[in-house]
Image: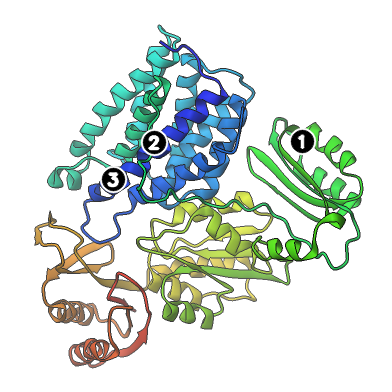
Amino acid sequence: MKNTINGLDFSRLMISAAASIEINKQKLNELNVFPVPDGDTGTNMSMTINAASADLRKLESPSLEQASSAAASAMLRGARGNSGVILSLLLRGISRKLKGKKECDGALWAAALQEGVDAAYKAVMKPAEGTILTVARLAAAKAVRTSKRNKSFEAVHAAAIEEAKVALANTVNQNPVLKKAGVVDAGGKGWLLVLEAMMSALQGQEIVVPEGAADVPVNDQADFSSFDTEDITFTYCTEFIISRENNKDPEALRAFLSELGDSLVLVDDEEIIKVHVHTNDPGTALHEAISYGSFVTVKIENMRLQHSDKVMSEQDTQPKIAEPEKPFGVVSVCAGDGLAAVFKDLGVDGIISGGQTMNPSTQDILEAVNKVPAETVFVLPNNKNIIMAAQQVDALTPKHVVVISSKTVPQGVTAMLSFNPDGTEEENVEAMTEALSTVDTMQITYAARNSDFDGYDIHEGDYLAIYGSALFGTDQDITVLLKALAERVRDDDRSYITIYYGADIQEDQAQIAQDIFCEICPDADINLLCGGQPVYYYLISAE
């Protein structure tokens, strides 16, 4: 029985866990009860943890602190969807507890699991029972109890797995929707897979993705390089990451380095400080920086020796942090050229491609935010499964990030109509947030699988209508659903209706949808626009 693990062990355990999630991601997706084609819990968890796996594979002999820190940092930036963000927060808490440790026994591991649970719960405003949070919390509690009588890492981890299995099985009883569908929580299942895969690696049986399987997605990490080679004033491009080990203010380091060179970018969160600076004296920069904590990575390049074409080619692929030219800017998430054009026309600075079935990562949102030439950047997620990923960005950029919790594209459009670039931050937050409740969102998509959901006997391929967040109806004839939605809008006395038709709908078909609404809602102002969105045939807003 293995009593302790070191950094190399931790890397092996995490890489094995990532492989297990990758192999089982479709099974996790299929556990999603709502039968719409956006069952992406498994996909989001896989892309999140594979960001850690990719970085860990680059480390030859990491210490325990280096391995856990690298995993947590990569997952924070690569987090996608609520399940991915929660998974990243669990690892972030674990990493925080392992900081400064060379080995981890059962007692420390139990404390680390509990720290991960605490970090995840703090980030969720209204934690619900019967989710990944429940499974992680009960597993950690069992690990803590076991560690009081047995300090072996393997014994404590085995106890966590045992309790996670029980907790996962009970999620069926804690969530009425899961109970009716007869399935366990997808996120909770994912966490159990992580724990079990770690145990397999601990016992010398690493899980690997079979040959011929889909390539494991890798999220490229921003290195914050930004310089112009046409006029090099300072010779050395100096980049490093420090693990924060004291309470020294990173702003003092920023002030020091700004006197030492130019092209300075300093980004920090609770655990790291990441720096890029051009200087003629990298030794002085590193000497000052080490007083803030230990170096995780250091890279120094002589820019005068670099080939100009190569530098320019690399520069084209590297994200920049735009200098502020105005107080406020906005980025919005959406999928479809038509929807992107609507947001651009309303004054949005940047579009992040994504939405249902393709939640952007925290890194994707971060890069879009950094490109906006504004001090404060408002983010419109336009999807409930993207909000948490967006909320992680503020700690990763020198810009101030404000997330407006829009859950649908129509909510995001309405929020932009309330945005005032000449107002204050507080005024805009209040106006944009209040606007979210003034619009009803309707969507028509298709059933991804057979399901008995909320009283509906649903067959794969049926059209599904969603009103707000609830299933509204299902039918094999899309016009039946359009008529039912129009009648609901009429009964709710809505005056302004916008129909965005998707990539799979022809203009003449969309015209039929508009005619249906015009006939049933003769007093309403009805607009038809090509949204170009995938998966959803129609997005309809009513105000």
Tell me which numbered mark, 2 or 3, is placed earlier along the sequence: 3
The part of the image, by quadrant, that contains residue 228 is: bottom right
Q: Is residue 293 above or below residue 361?
A: above
Q: CA distance from mark 2 to mark 3?
A: 18 Å
Residue at the image point whose x is 45% and y is 56% from the top: 387
Q: Which mark, by number, is residue 464? A: none
Q: Which mark, by number, is residue 28? A: 3
Residue at the image point whose x is 85% and y is 68% from the top: 230
Residue 122, given in percent of the width and then of the height, sits at 47, 39
Tell me which numbered mark, 1 or 2, is placed earlier along the sequence: 2
Of badges 1 and 3, nearer the viewer stands: 3
Q: CA distance from mark 1 to mark 2?
A: 42 Å
What crowding class fits label 3: few (fewer than 14 Cα within 10 Å), some (14-19), or many (20 or more)? Answer: many
Disc 2: which residue:
208
Residue type pointed to by label 1: Lys
The answer to which of 313 and 182 lies nearer the viewer is: 313
Residue type pointed to by label 2: Val
Disc 1: which residue:
248
